[in-house]
């Protein structure tokens, strides 16, 4: 892919399937249809169209279309660029042996959502149900460059699991949390991938002995609040954390911390006193 297409893909739902062999599956159209159908939303047009410009064990380029969905497929018999592996596989929370296996991948398929569906959850589900068609014994993992995450296939591609994503967004797979250290005990904790859901990323400066789990829980709760309630927040707005008597204030990313910025912007959250509360609009 060209640099321009890679920049465009950073704004689109995208996953990379990584394989342990120097080739990837080349299923025929019937196999692809059989893999996708069990997860189709009942409102979708059942017609699944598969077209290939190139379909070989060493290289492929094609599209899959059904309903409002269009997925571009591109495969190469080489690993992902090192910078992508470093910010996804390397930073993922999986056990060392799982990450080591993923780092040893030899080929990859990129699935990019280019359809016209509105719901971002359905876009991600479409990528996962398409990935089912290319899941084989050599599939080592699923890499989400937008979210700085990577995970093994495990049961995440089963029809039941994919259908469940409509009720419970798997934020541990689709949104990452990354540390940027300033000093040994002080670091920025920032989310990645919220822009796919039209939600700003969130950042918090963690100081000595602060509870990181609590901050991540705040990130999750704020994400759901902004996403499900379709609330717009800006610097200066304050939220009360229910049943905890805590207040969080939104602030702008400080000067010189551009590395925190996400494609839909990033808001810093800070602990605040309830003196001057400005609720989000």
Image (cartoon, rainbow, N blue to C red):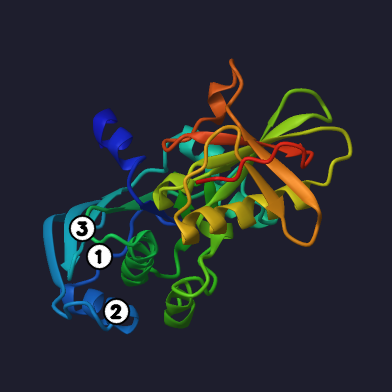
- The numbered mark, 3 or 2, whose residue comes first in the sequence reads 2
Please name which of the two marks, 3 or 2, marks the residue nearer to the observer: 3
Q: Are marks 1 and 2 in contact (CB under 8 Å)?
A: no
Question: 244 or 22: which is nearer to us?
Answer: 244
Query: Residue, x 36% and y 40% (percent of image)?
Result: 10
Question: How far separated are the C-alphas under marks 1 and 2?
Answer: 22 Å
In the picture of the structure, the residue carrying the numbered disc 2 is 40
In the picture of the structure, the residue carrying the numbered disc 1 is 26
Query: Residue, x 39% and y 52% (percent of image)?
Result: 16
Question: How far separated are the C-alphas under marks 3 and 1?
Answer: 26 Å
Residue 192 shows which numbered tag?
none
Furthest residue to the front?
276
- Above or below, comparing residue 238 to residue 163 in the picture: above
Give the percent coordinates (x, y) of residue 102.
54, 52
In the picture of the structure, the residue carrying the numbered disc 3 is 116
Furthest residue to the top?
256
- Above or below, comparing residue 50 to residue 199 in the picture: below
Question: How far separated are the C-alphas under marks 3 and 2?
Answer: 16 Å
- Above or below, comparing residue 211 to residue 270 in the picture: below
Q: Badge 3, how many Cα within 10 Å: few under 14, some, many 20+?
A: few
Give the percent coordinates (x, y) of residue 180.
67, 30
Q: Are marks 3 and 2 in contact (CB under 8 Å)?
A: no
- Above or below, comparing residue 27 to residue 53 in the picture: below
- The numbered mark, 3 or 1, whose residue comes first in the sequence reads 1
Give the percent coordinates (x, y) of residue 133.
31, 71
Quadrant in which the N terminus appears: top left
Question: 269 or 129: which is nearer to us?
Answer: 269
Question: 126 or 108: which is nearer to us?
Answer: 126
Is label 3 in a helix, a strand or a loop?
A: loop
Please name which of the two marks, 1 or 2, marks the residue nearer to the observer: 2
Going by the image, does 158 lie left or right of 272? Answer: left
Is label 1 in a helix, a strand or a loop?
A: loop
């Amino acid at each position: 892919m060209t640099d321009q297409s890679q920049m465009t893909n950073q704004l689109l739902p995208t996953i990379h399937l990584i394989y342990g062999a120097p080739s990837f599956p080349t299923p025929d159209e019937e196999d692809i249809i059989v893999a996708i159908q069990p997860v189709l939303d009942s409102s979708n047009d059942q017609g699944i169209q598969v077209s290939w410009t190139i379909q070989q064990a060493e290289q492929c380029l094609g599209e899959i279309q059904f309903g409002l969905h269009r997925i571009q497929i591109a495969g190469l018999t080489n690993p992902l660029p090192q910078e992508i592996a470093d910010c996804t596989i390397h930073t993922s929370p999986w056990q060392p042996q799982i990450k080591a296996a993923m780092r040893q991948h030899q080929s990859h398929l990129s699935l990019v959502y280019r359809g016209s569906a509105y719901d971002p959850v359905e876009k991600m589900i479409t990528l996962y149900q398409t990935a089912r068609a290319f899941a084989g014994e050599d599939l080592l993992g699923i890499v989400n460059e937008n979210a700085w995450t990577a995970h093994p296939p495990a049961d995440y591609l089963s029809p039941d699991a994919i259908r469940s994503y409509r009720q419970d967004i798997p934020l541990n797979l689709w949104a990452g949390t990354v540390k940027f250290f300033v000093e040994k005990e002080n670091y920025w904790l920032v989310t990645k991938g919220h822009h796919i859901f039209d939600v700003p990323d969130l950042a918090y400066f963690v100081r000595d002995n602060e509870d990181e789990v609590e901050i991540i829980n705040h990130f999750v709760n704020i994400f759901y609040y902004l996403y499900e309630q379709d609330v717009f927040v800006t610097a200066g707005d304050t939220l009360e954390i229910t049943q905890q008597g805590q207040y969080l204030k939104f602030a702008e990313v400080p000067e010189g911390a551009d590395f925190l910025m996400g494609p839909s912007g990033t808001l810093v959250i800070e602990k605040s006193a309830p003196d001057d509360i400005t609720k989000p609009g």
